[in-house]
Image (cartoon, helix red, strand yellow):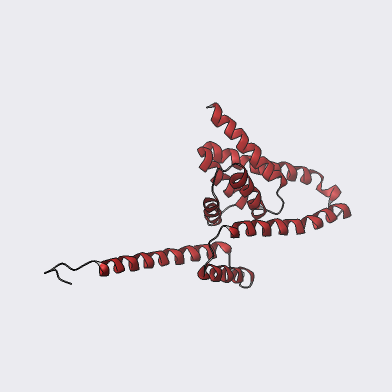
Amino acid sequence: MQKKAAKLVKLFTIFFRIGLFTFGGGFAMIPLIRREFVDKQGWIDEERFIDAISVTQTVPGAVAINLSIFFGYRLLGLAGAFTAAFAVALPSFLIILGIAAFFNNFSGHPLIDNIFRGIRPAIVALILYGGYQLSKSVKWTGSLVMTTVLALMAVSLLNISPVIIIFIVLLVSFISHLLRAGRIVLDEDRQKPVKEGQDV
């Protein structure tokens, strides 16, 4: 029981820190979670981490909350899910509460505008860095490169929802797996020796 309580405290601390220092939404949070869970703690490997990112993109809700619930549950069950979700949302809640209380006094202030203008490039860099780190663990093939390019074009040029694209890719991958499995079975049947007197 004490070990679980200690892990819950550690989980709360990690996600509270991630929520406190993450600007730009859930996607900017991905490299921070990866560094904590994959690199530092070793709680999950790179492949499982990428799978988790894919799964949390297919369900409604904020990316940050979905990720925290997923990893919290994988580590410590329901208690971990609630702890992680509460911890990652608490900093934003407190900060926004403070901003809302004093918004009228600071809205449009040049200093505040300059601060947010300076944060934006850092957010973009953080998101790009997260994508780069994830791409290093992918075993790239011609079909994966083509899928990535088509998905990027669909999002940027056609304004198609990323959720729709993920579902399409999942469906195509599933069908491709079935066809490949069926082809393997057919090849194995052809290679089996025909016994004497057996119908071909």
Question: Where is residue 92, by image quadrant?
Answer: top right
User: Can I make out residue 43 in this image?
Assistant: yes
> As drawn, is 194 to the left or to the right of 110?
left
> As drawn, is 87 to the left or to the right of 116?
left
- Residue 171 x/y as whole percent: 45, 64
- Residue 36 x/y as whole percent: 63, 44
Residue at 45% from the left image edge and 67% from the top image edge: 172
Q: Is residue 6 above or below residue 37?
A: above
User: Can I make out residue 62 in this image?
Assistant: no
> As drawn, is 193 to the left or to the right of 70?
left
Q: Is residue 153 above or below residue 5?
A: below
Q: Residue furthest left?
A: 197
- Residue 70 x/y as whole percent: 54, 46
Count the marks: how many?
0
Residue at 53% from the left image edge and 52% from the top image edge: 52
> As drawn, is 163 to the left or to the right of 93?
left
Q: Residue furthest right?
A: 110
- Residue 50 x/y as whole percent: 55, 54
